[in-house]
Amino acid sequence: MDVSNEREKLQQIRHRFISVLAQNIGLYGISETNGRLYGTILFSNKPMTLDDMSKALGMSKTSMSTGVRVLSEADMVTRVWEKGNRKDLYETEDDWYKSFISVFINRWREGTDKNKHAATRAKEALEMLLDETNDEDLIEEIKQDIDKLEGALHYYEWLDEVIHLFESGDIFKLIPKK
Amino acid sequence: MDVSNEREKLQQIRHRFISVLAQNIGLYGISETNGRLYGTILFSNKPMTLDDMSKALGMSKTSMSTGVRVLSEADMVTRVWEKGNRKDLYETEDDWYKSFISVFINRWREGTDKNKHAATRAKEALEMLLDETNDEDLIEEIKQDIDKLEGALHYYEWLDEVIHLFESGDIFKLIPKK
DNA sequence: AAGTTTGTACAGTAAAAACTGTACAATCAA
DNA sequence: TTGATTGTACAGTTTTTACTGTACAAACTT
């Protein structure tokens, strides 16, 4: 088997892995195409330009530009400088713990905070309404709603602490990096 | 302020909370509309029929049917029986720990396993290719790829243990339910 | 300065997802 | 059995998202 054939095989192995990676990267809030872009940059063993990516994925440079922006904002790729090169170069953050966990934390922190805030506000509003009304049935319904919101709030508080376990890095005391 | 006005206010408070909940439920892999459906059933203080939902959300019964199926598969709502009622009735699983954590676990377990499997297969394939080839440059590239896959696999193993922490319920020893 | 090259905004197009209405099978009532 | 009601498959539509090509501003070269 000659070298070009072997190289072909290498590409195929990479491609297969990148496909699976991209399909499951939705867990981190990244779209499949951007996941494919991430995988491509990951396995390019040198930093890539937008044109490189465009060529590698057969997609427009515009798409690469927006894709790279999303990945940069998620701290999954970083821009890197190289003397004498006018083009922007990008490479992946190779520490998977760092990049994936931080993406995870950002997403969950944001979502949980918003929910918690909304639940608190709703509970307060219901308590005010409870004071105002005299209708028996309505009072009963409001009380049930407050119960539900309290259940939700307990869960969010718990989740808060879970997220903090990751933010603080304490999770690694419990489950050490491999 | 009369009762109908107060009832209006109650609906508004519910609606506002449900909107936020629905916007953030994507974290659990549920779409925003299905999140709204979940919220609607949650705050209906009695089990709902498809027609109830359709009316409450102003959407087709077909959509309710498919939506409820998604939520059922995720164990977020359950079908419930009532004597003398021909229609299917649904209510939410009220234990947020139970429903949300199980949805979370299912998603992450599945995604992580797939990635781990793909990484293992890719690594094996690369090791075979490494044996076959004699080209210096190619050997170097393959080695770099293997390194990356090993990094990924370490992360996946770690993630595996994290997921298991939730599956086993041991997380509650560390961070007790509120 | 003029001439290139590079990244991105924006408008338009293609593809995908969400949603609806109709049709029909399954279940129940009489 | 017939007639009515309920849930869902399926086809078609609308809405949303993804993607592209063009045009242009910013940065660099000469």
Image: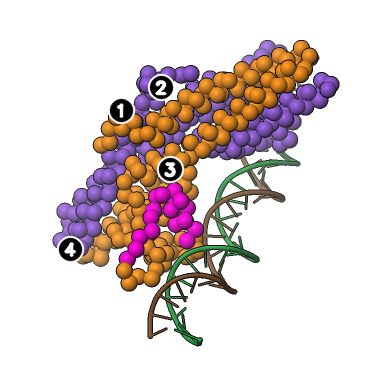
Chain colours: A orange, B purple, C green, D brown
Crowd around label 2: few <14 · some 14–19 · many ≥20 (10 Å)? few
Question: Considering depth in this image, is A74 or D12 the residue closer to the camera?
Answer: A74
Residue ID for mark 4: B135
Going by the numbered disc 1, the residue's amino acid type is Leu
Q: Is residue D29 left or right of residue D14?
A: left
Secondary structure under the numbered disc 2 in the rendered image? loop
Give yes or no for contact between labels 2 and 1 (Cβ–Cβ under 8 Å): no
Going by the numbered disc 3, the residue's amino acid type is Val
Q: How far apart are labels 3 and 2 at the CA level?
A: 22 Å
Q: How far apart are labels 1 and 3 at the CA level?
A: 21 Å
Residue ID for mark 1: A174
Measured as percent of width and height from the top left, residue A126 is found at 68, 22
Residue drawn at (37%, 45%), measured in percent from left and top?
A: A99
Going by the numbered disc 2, the residue's amino acid type is Ile
Q: How far apart are labels 4 and 2 at the CA level?
A: 54 Å
Secondary structure under the numbered disc 3 in the rendered image? helix
Q: Is residue B165 magenta?
A: no
Crowd around label 1: few <14 · some 14–19 · many ≥20 (10 Å)? few
The disc label shown at residue B175, or none: 2
Q: Are marks 2 and 1 on the same chain?
A: no
Question: Considering depth in this image, is B48 or B81 the residue closer to the camera?
Answer: B48
Q: How far apart are labels 1 and 4 at the CA level?
A: 44 Å
Residue drawn at (50%, 25%), measured in percent from left and top?
A: A157
Give yes or no for contact between labels 4 and 2 (Cβ–Cβ under 8 Å): no
Above or below B46: residue A10: below
